Image (spheres, helix red, strand yellow):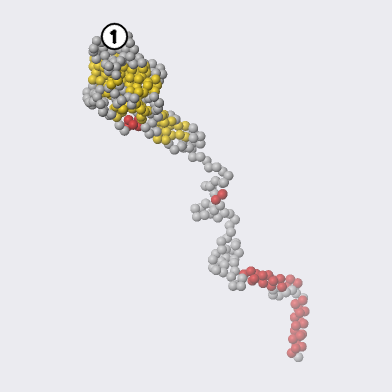
């Protein structure tokens, strides 16, 4: 009886269930749902760990938060984009860096005897210190002079250059060693008829011979010329003789100049003179640079001597002595060639730099 009652109950239940809405035709999970759940469990792993979705930012089974993948680039610790190719401060591989323009392109200039050069991109090359040379506009100009060892000299001309003039100036930069006596910087004549020389005491003597046997001129105080580079100028103006050292008047002597003439032409020399026997004597120990001869009394008061002499309408001759080699030095005015004889060689000439260190 018990089994019959159970059968009736089941039959009644099925009838009632079949009469419900088809959308409620099943209770509990379907086969499809079971299959989906099975796949989900399989992906979660046997250890029970699981990952949250990337949008949810849920923690995984290890307790660590999984980073969400952003729609935009991730910024680094400096606030810049992690993508170096697209960062604001960097350039792409195909772009060239803009030059750092620090000077006017294609220019040169001098500052404190240092040559500066700017290329066509506005970038300065490594500056060039001109040293004992002189920086001029676009290059370092070599400064040469002639060094005399006490046995050599230079024949400048076969003729008088200033001896016949009432007014004249003989000037040069002189680096005297202080070794000898009666050492000639410049002279004219055979034998000598005009001299600019230095004595062992450092006194300077500028004089010329006047017939029948007179030597009017001026002698300065001892110590007027020291060692190292100094500008020396001997000036005659028709009524007297003056000597300037580094632009300062150090001696003057008045003389009632009388007209006289020399029928012969006598040579002019640098670094020695010809004695009464017509033999060289009075050799210089030292160096000479920038010899200029003028047809006027160029200086009548103290002045600032130029490091580099310039030729003008009153210049008779100008030997810069910047050749640096060879056996001749050329006058810039008329092209006279001075010939080096004996112990004469090339040495570093006067410049702004070596005047600072004298």
Question: Which residue is at 56% across, 61% downward?
Answer: 67
Q: Position of residue 93 (x, y in %)?
A: 57, 46
Relative to residue 344, is residue 85 depicted above or below?
Answer: below
Q: Position of residue 45 (x, y in %)?
A: 61, 71
Q: Quadrant of residue 282?
A: top left
Badge 1 crowding class, 10 Å Cα cut-off, few under 14, some 14 to 19, many 20 or more, is few
User: Is 53 on the left-hand or right-hand side of 253?
Assistant: right
- Residue 351 makes an appearance in the image: no
- Residue 54 makes an appearance in the image: yes
Relative to residue 255, is residue 339 depicted above or below?
Answer: below
Relative to residue 51, is residue 309 depicted above or below?
Answer: above
* Quadrant (top left/top right/bottom left/bottom right) for the N terminus: bottom right
Looking at this view, is 16 or 106 the one in front?
Answer: 106
Looking at this view, is 113 or 77 the one in front?
Answer: 113
Q: Count the numbered circles shown.
A: 1
Q: Position of residue 141 (x, y in %)?
A: 41, 29
* Quadrant (top left/top right/bottom left/bottom right) for the C terminus: top left
Q: Position of residue 96 (x, y in %)?
A: 55, 42
Secondary structure beneath dot 1 equals: loop
Question: Which residue is at 56% across, 69% downward?
Answer: 61
| Residue that numbered label 1 is attached to | 260
User: Is 4 on the left-hand or right-hand side of 355?
Assistant: right
Question: Which residue is at 74% across, 74% downward?
Answer: 25
Outermost residue to the bottom: 1
User: Is 278 on the left-hand or right-hand side of 21?
Assistant: left
Q: Quadrant of residue 268?
A: top left
Relative to residue 141, is residue 192 depicted above or below?
Answer: above
Question: Which residue is at 57% across, 60% downward?
Answer: 68
Q: Quadrant of residue 113?
A: top left
Looking at this view, is 328 or 12 the one in front?
Answer: 328
User: Is 58 on the left-hand or right-hand side of 30?
Assistant: left
């Amino acid at each position: 009886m018990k089994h019959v009652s159970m059968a009736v109950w089941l039959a009644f239940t099925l009838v009632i269930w079949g009469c419900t809405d088809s959308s409620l035709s099943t209770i509990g999970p379907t086969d499809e749902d079971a299959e989906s759940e099975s796949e989900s469990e399989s992906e979660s792993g046997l250890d029970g760990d699981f990952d949250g979705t990337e949008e949810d930012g849920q923690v995984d089974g290890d307790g660590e938060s999984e980073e969400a993948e952003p729609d935009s680039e991730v910024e680094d610790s400096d606030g810049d984009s992690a993508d170096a190719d697209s960062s604001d401060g960097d350039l792409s591989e195909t772009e060239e860096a803009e030059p750092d323009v620090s000077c006017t392109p294609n220019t040169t200039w001098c500052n404190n005897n240092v040559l500066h050069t700017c290329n066509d991109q506005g970038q300065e090359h490594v500056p060039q210190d001109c040293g004992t040379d002189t920086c001029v506009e676009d290059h370092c100009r070599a400064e040469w002079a002639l060094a005399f060892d006490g046995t050599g000299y230079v024949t400048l001309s076969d003729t008088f250059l200033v001896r016949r003039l009432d007014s004249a100036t003989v000037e040069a930069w002189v680096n005297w060693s202080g070794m000898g006596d009666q050492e000639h910087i410049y002279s004219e004549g055979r034998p000598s008829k005009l001299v600019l020389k230095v004595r062992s005491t450092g006194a300077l003597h500028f004089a010329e011979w006047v017939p029948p046997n007179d030597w009017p001129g001026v002698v300065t105080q001892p110590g007027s010329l020291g060692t190292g580079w100094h500008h020396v100028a001997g000036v005659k103006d028709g009524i007297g003789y003056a000597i300037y050292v580094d632009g300062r008047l150090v001696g003057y002597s008045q003389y009632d100049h009388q007209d006289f003439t020399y029928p012969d032409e006598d040579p002019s020399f640098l670094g020695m003179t010809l004695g009464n026997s017509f033999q060289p004597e009075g050799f210089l120990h030292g160096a000479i640079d920038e010899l200029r001869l003028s047809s006027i009394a160029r200086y009548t008061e103290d002045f600032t001597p130029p490091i580099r002499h310039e030729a003008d309408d009153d210049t008779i001759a100008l030997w810069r002595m910047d050749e640096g080699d060879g056996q001749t030095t050329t006058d810039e005015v008329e092209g006279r060639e001075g010939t080096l004889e004996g112990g004469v060689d090339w040495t570093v000439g006067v410049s702004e730099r070596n005047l600072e260190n004298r």
